[in-house]
Amino acid sequence: MCGIAGMAGVADEFLLKEMLAITRHRGPNDTGTYVSERHSASACIAIGNNRLSIIDLSPAGHQPMSNEDGTVWVVYNGEIYNFPELRNDLVRDGHQFKSRTDTEVLVHLYEKYGPEMVKRLNGMFAFALWDVARQELFIFRDRMGIKPLYYTQVGGRLYFASEVKALLACPDVAVEVDPSSLYQYLAHLYVPNPASLFKGIFKLPPGHSLRWRKGAIRIDPYWDLSYGDYFVESEKELAERLRELLVRVTKRQLISEVPVGFFLSGGLDSSALVACAAQSHGASLDCYSIAYKEEHGRLEQCSDDARYARQVASHFGAEFHEIVVDPKVTSLLPKAVWHMDDPIADPSIIATYLLSEAAAPKVKVLLTGQGADEVFGGYRVHRAHKSNTLLRLIPRKVREEMSPKVFKWLAQHKDRAFVVSPGLLMAVCRFGEKMLRTSGLGPQEQYAALRSYLGDDDLRGLLSPEVSAETMRMSYRDAFRGHFDKVSGEDFVNQMLYVDAKTFLPDLNLAYSDKMSMACSVELRVPFLDNEIVDFLARVPPSLKIHGLTQKYILRKAMKPVLPKSILTRRKAAFGLPIRSWFKNELREMLTDLLSEDRIRRRGLLDPAAVTQMIRDNETGKRDLTLPLWGLLTLELWHQAFIDQKSTVTPERLLV
């Protein structure tokens, strides 16, 4: 696991080292560079790597790495889980290795197959490979987008890196807010690929390659998710096959020469991984879970993750580590925003950072259940179209006028509830109101509305007149339309999972997981996104993913023999933090200061009166705008770090 950076069309070793220094947290164990001989600009490249040593801790794992005659060079970030098999095949062909790393497999695999070699890899990766003879630079990103890769082109010069902040060290790179990306960010709290919030800086999409040759770039897909050829075996047989596959994949992803641990929320996904690991892992498992104080958690839908996580750890004899959240969030949030650089306004960022920070002294690799919801159908939005069948039996006037008032009344009287916690009642009311409001839409339109936090009317009113004029033809639905079109003939469950795999998964969940764990020099692995799991589930009938209203049905069946019943039947809960309590207490002053009308006016991106109204509505309970306001707070901190300062400074020096 590493961080990479480089350039083509120019070979500035001093600049490359500066780019690597900015992202040294991604690889504190070693750093290295390769700079081509100074020929014409069409043959100039410089590539570098910061290494977090996981496999082959010896100096033999130093990058950049080449083949025997130095005609192929690579810098690499990730893990190739099937590298032992690939290596054995290459050895039989006569290729010679000087290390035990998966990195070295890449150069020899390229020698044998050329760019098509990427189709043989099972893992998470972003790597750049320079073919000296052909004077071509190839950059590849893994199928699901687990590892990040950003690039920008200035004339014939290409710059790339694992994190945006490394690109900002380049004098050629201008730093501006992209209005179209801002629109999507405010709607979704992240920017869908291939764009970033920085104008002219792009993400290489998942499952794509980039080729640079003589100043020109070409981007092509090498893999896409497809459904069909469904299994005909019985439900019981498929559940058994899935469980065996999960055990095999988890065992494979435990390969490491440094200590390994688990994120354990006590939910189905992370508990399933711990159960699978317990069957094959000889040593005791280290499991990490987050908790927060009762007074903080009362306004959130779940505050008892640690109780369930402790139960799972005890069941499998694992060592349990509970991290109680009481951070100095006013100082931690700017730091998290700096590490994210391409902003994502999800409070889970803070939780992931705190867990990674707590685990770092003992383990350098953590396995997480992320990705399971996107391949099994685990989010509430995935069954909304089925719930609509029942909701439409309610007269339209009741759905659209009376029922929202009932939800609003319940939310206002949350403290009088005895059966459920105030936070859970508020969460039910928020989603119930949104379901009723969108129940008259078509399936695709409802999916887009439920995946968004602000609609087009809200966005038009929130943006300044200048930005609104530039984005007047845009809609929050734009992020999803093209992806839906590609799978329009599929069952709607698979349509939603496909769109998730192209947007929400790589651009939000995987992006913050990578950057927050790597901020602590910890590698995060996601077994549910292993090639074998993804390919298997693409052939599982949609009715076994969501069966009636039961979500992740086939996973529950697969894990029934090994997990406690309380885990199998537990209600899904978000992996979040008590930000509603923070907005009332720790973050109240920061929120009003950083989103003051004067500051907003000087930025020129948003309408000051609209922002003030959002804060007022949220405080009075007229609307729950907690997450959109978190997004605005994140945006201001991002603006301070990267627009005001073109920030290559350390996060400790950021102004708040």
Image (cartoon, rainbow, N blue to C red):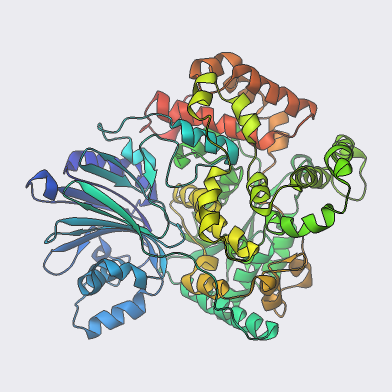
* Viewer-nearest residue: 262 or 258: 262
Q: Position of residue 423 (x, y in %)?
A: 79, 44
Q: Is residue 472 above or below residue 144?
A: above
Q: Is residue 462 left or right of residue 160?
A: right
- Answer whether residue 320 is visible to the viewer in this image: yes
Q: Looking at the picture, how far across and down is residue 248, in whole percent?
A: 52, 79
The one nearer the camera, 243 or 333, is 243
Q: Please indicate whether residue 364 sits to the left or right of residue 619 in the image.
A: left
User: Which residue is drawn at the image coordinates 75% and 50% (left, top)?
Assistant: 302
Height in image: 575 above or below 456? below
* Residue 572 seen from this side: no
- x, y (%) of residue 341? 44, 39
Residue under the image location 14 percent in, 60 percent down: 134
Q: Position of residue 550 (x, y in %)?
A: 75, 66
Task: Please tell me which residue is depicted at 53% across the width and 35% down the height of the picture.
Answer: 474
For residue 198, what is the image quadrant? Answer: top left
Task: Depth check: give the residue in front, 209 or 31.
Answer: 209
Count up the numbered dots: 0
Q: Left or right of 192: which side holds 78?
A: left
